[in-house]
Amino acid sequence: MRLSTTKPTKKMQITKLLSVAAITFVLVGCAHPLTINPDVSKIGLSTTDQPIKKNVAYYIPDTMRSKEVTTPGGGGDKVTYSPYRDIEVGFYKMLSNTFSSVTKLSTKNDKDAIEKNKIDYVITPDLLTNSSSSSALTWPPTQFSVDMTCDINDASGNLLFSKKVAGEGHAEYDEFKKDFSLAGKRATEDVLVKMQRTLLDTQELRQ
């Protein structure tokens, strides 16, 4: 018996090529979720540092807290994370190290909370993040950066000044193979420690 064969048509070949291209795009273009929350135990206060004897509040809008950011990873892939949500606990720890008391505001001009807690300053953080990788084979970023700007207002809402610092985090494969977010976590730790130092050294805050 002679088996019949069907020669692929041009249309079938094109369809196959498109399918392969689509699969390749999905595999290469993935955005992998990360959590870049810092290790708060690494955000400490030196015994030689004197906290600022002022009461502060901080404000992060819910829209920013839930905001997702996508930046490059390795191998053509990307990573996605929520920087404000991930950094908030560490941010609170940093402020607690720096000032006498810290209050979280539900709205930026929450007059009741500001008066009740005798707030001297309201601090609003702004974050800018980026990432990259030296690897063409693995997707976790080996390099991560976090720029933080803190706007500092008085209790009446007047902007006094802004402070900006830049944090960096690096991790190689042998380190991040157990924690894909390691470079990001190191960057958030770095930026918080630097912001703490900057605030402690700002003499205007002690007046």
Image (cartoon, helix red, strand yellow):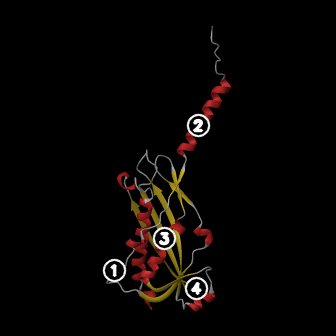
Q: Position of residue 41 (x, y in %)?
A: 39, 72
Q: CA distance from mark 1 to mark 4?
A: 31 Å
Q: Position of residue 58 (x, y in %)?
A: 54, 80
Q: Residue furthest top?
A: 1
Q: Which mark is residue 21?
A: 2
The answer to whether 192 is drawn above or below residue 175 in the figure is below
Q: Amino acid at mark 2?
A: Ala
Q: Amino acid at mark 1?
A: Ser
Callout in the foreground (4, 3): 3
Q: CA distance from mark 3 to mark 2?
A: 40 Å
Callout in the foreground (4, 2): 2
Q: CA distance from mark 3 to mark 1?
A: 22 Å
Q: Amino acid at mark 4?
A: Asn
How many residues crowd mark 2 within 10 Å: few (<14), some (14–19), many (20+)? few
Callout in the foreground (1, 4): 1
Counting residues from the N terminus, which is met first, the one under dot 1 or under dot 4?
A: 1
Counting residues from the N terminus, which is met first, the one under dot 4 or under dot 2?
A: 2
Q: State if disc 3 and disc 4 touch (CB < 8 Å).
A: no
Q: CA distance from mark 2 to mark 1?
A: 56 Å
Q: Quadrant of residue 108?
A: bottom right
How many residues crowd mark 3 within 10 Å: few (<14), some (14–19), many (20+)? many
Q: CA distance from mark 4 to mark 3?
A: 20 Å
Counting residues from the N terminus, which is met first, the one under dot 3 or under dot 1?
A: 1
The answer to whether 105 is drawn above or below residue 2 in the figure is below
How many residues crowd mark 4 within 10 Å: few (<14), some (14–19), many (20+)? few
The answer to whether 13 is drawn above or below residue 62 in the figure is above
Q: Which residue is mark 4?
A: 158
> The residue tagged with tag 4: helix, strand or loop?
loop
Q: Amino acid at mark 3?
A: Met
Q: State if disc 4 and disc 1 touch (CB < 8 Å).
A: no
